[in-house]
Image (spheres, helix red, strand yellow):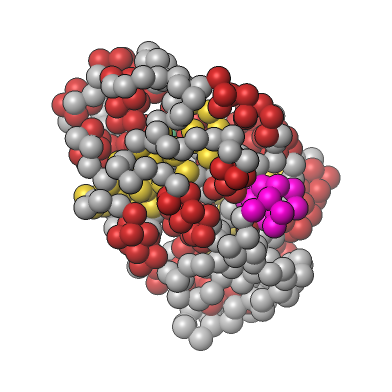
Amino acid sequence: MSFDSLGLAPALLRALADYGYTQPTPIQAAAIPPALEGHDLLAAAQTGTGKTAAFALPLLQKLSTSGQTMTRRPRALVLTPTRELAAQVHENLRDYGKHVQVSATTIFGGVSMGPQINTLRRGVDIVIATPGRLMDHMQQRTLDLSAVETLVLDEADRMLDMGFLPALKRILAALPKKRQTLLFSATFAPAIKALAMDFMHNPREISVSAPNTVTTLVSHQVHPVDTSRKRDLLLHLLSADSRRQSLVFSRTKHGADKLVTFLNASGLRAAAIHGNKSQNARTRALGDFKSGRVTVLVATDIAARGIDIEQLPIVINFDLPSVAEDYVHRIGRTGRAGLEGLAISLVSHDESGLLHDIRKLLKKDIAINPVTGYEPSTPLRLDAGAPRPKQGGGNRQPSRQPRQGKTSSSARPNGYAAPGRNEHAAGNHKRRSRPRPAAKA
Ligand code: AMP
């Protein structure tokens, strides 16, 4: 199938050709025609499947071919869980919309509101926002949502995980009832369905891969290792090819910082990206990684959302996520756009239970290969009763309470719902079989 058969305007086809996209991905083929027809969509698509273009192209087409552009009342709103994802969506919209007259801007916390207000005053067609800062603009009446015709909820499951449900409900209530809503989510949890029932109109359901699956292009490997030897094993693996770009996941922010210090002291070029870093530091770390100035990016789960690095060959889990679904999200950073990827997990005996959960979720065995010289003193257990890390133990930071429902500026000391802060939100979600422990990131 080619893009020509989807009903897209010539200006958009030209942009796709500029980027060498010859064929729509399955989610694009399934979502673009009904979206162009104006239907609401409930689309299950994990990251890396081309889901951004699946909503960006119909959005750009609608805005460029009907109604007025560049008014003070934006006509489309894209909500994302993190700033990085908002920036990524913005970049994609600019790329795909390079031959049409449609403007877009991002609204997220961690940067001052002034320039955002000025851009909104000048007039913009698409606002890409994280829920916290959007609420601030709504409260200060610096953003008028009364003309929004299309709402996109990107990575909706993650927004719920992060405790954004109250904010989402308030934002949804402020939008015109007559609108098109496109909801994209890696997983279809009951809470997502409930949101769709409440706020969508007869949505078409699209699922191009079963929820909670990872692309078959990624191969998985587990290296069992003692906790005390993980750092050395990581260094050993990274040193095998120090020019290769590797994304390393750490469960905690503190752990990510410690790893970066260790790797840099060992002669590698590493940077950390997590919610305790300033927005500038996060943007710089990501930019340096994308440009190849640093070859190892150590990230926490939430901060890594929206990281789209071309040809990222390898993701290493320095420790396993406490919730199995996060493994799917982590691994989604590699094996993107039809390329092969490798996911390596360093697993200690006390994480055996987490590995059990992941294997159960993926419904597949993962090869367990000890690395010579790093064999664990206690083998992994793979039964349901296998041990799990104690909550709040190890090098984690003390637990903080999630701030459910507090979305006003006064409730958020810095005036925004920084993703980093919400990394602690144990949240309003019901989909997880096991509650997400607070203060993990
Ligand atoms: P996404 O899932 O939207 O983050 O997209 C994952 C990656 O696939 C991004 O790097 C896109 O630029 C790329 N991509 C999206 N659509 C296509 C396509 N039809 N052909 C090739 N690459 C694509």
| Residue 417 magenta-highlighted | yes
Q: Quadrant of residue 336?
A: top left
Q: Quadrant of residue 28?
A: top left
Instruction: Residue at 47%, 43% (x, y): give it.
Output: 79
**Where residue 289 sits: x, y (%)?**
64, 34
Instruction: Residue at 62%, 30% (x, y): give it.
Output: 116
Looking at the image, the residue that sits furthest to the right is: 265
Q: Is residue 350 above or below residue 292?
A: below
Q: Is residue 336 above or below residue 330?
A: above
Q: Quadrant of the N terminus?
A: top left
Q: Quadrant of residue 101?
A: top left
Work out whether residue 401 or residue 245 is closer to the camera in this orientation and state it: 401
Q: Is residue 249 above or below residue 103?
A: below
| Left or right of 293 in this view: 358 | left
Work out whether residue 193 or residue 47 is closer to the camera in this orientation and state it: 193
**Where residue 96 sits: x, y (%)?**
39, 23
**Where residue 306 sits: x, y (%)?**
52, 42
**Where residue 63 sits: x, y (%)?**
34, 25
Q: Which residues are magenta?
A: 408-421
Work out whether residue 402 or residue 413 is closer to the camera in this orientation and state it: 413
Instruction: Residue at 67%, 47% (x, y): give it.
Output: 416
| Residue 80 magenta-highlighted | no
Instruction: Residue at 45%, 30% (x, y): give it.
Output: 74
Is residue 50 something one can see in this rendering? no
Is residue 264 something one can see in this rendering? yes
Q: Which image quarter has ligand 1?
A: top left
**Picture mark count:** 0
Q: Quadrant of the C terminus?
A: bottom right
Q: Is residue 196 above or below residue 138?
A: below
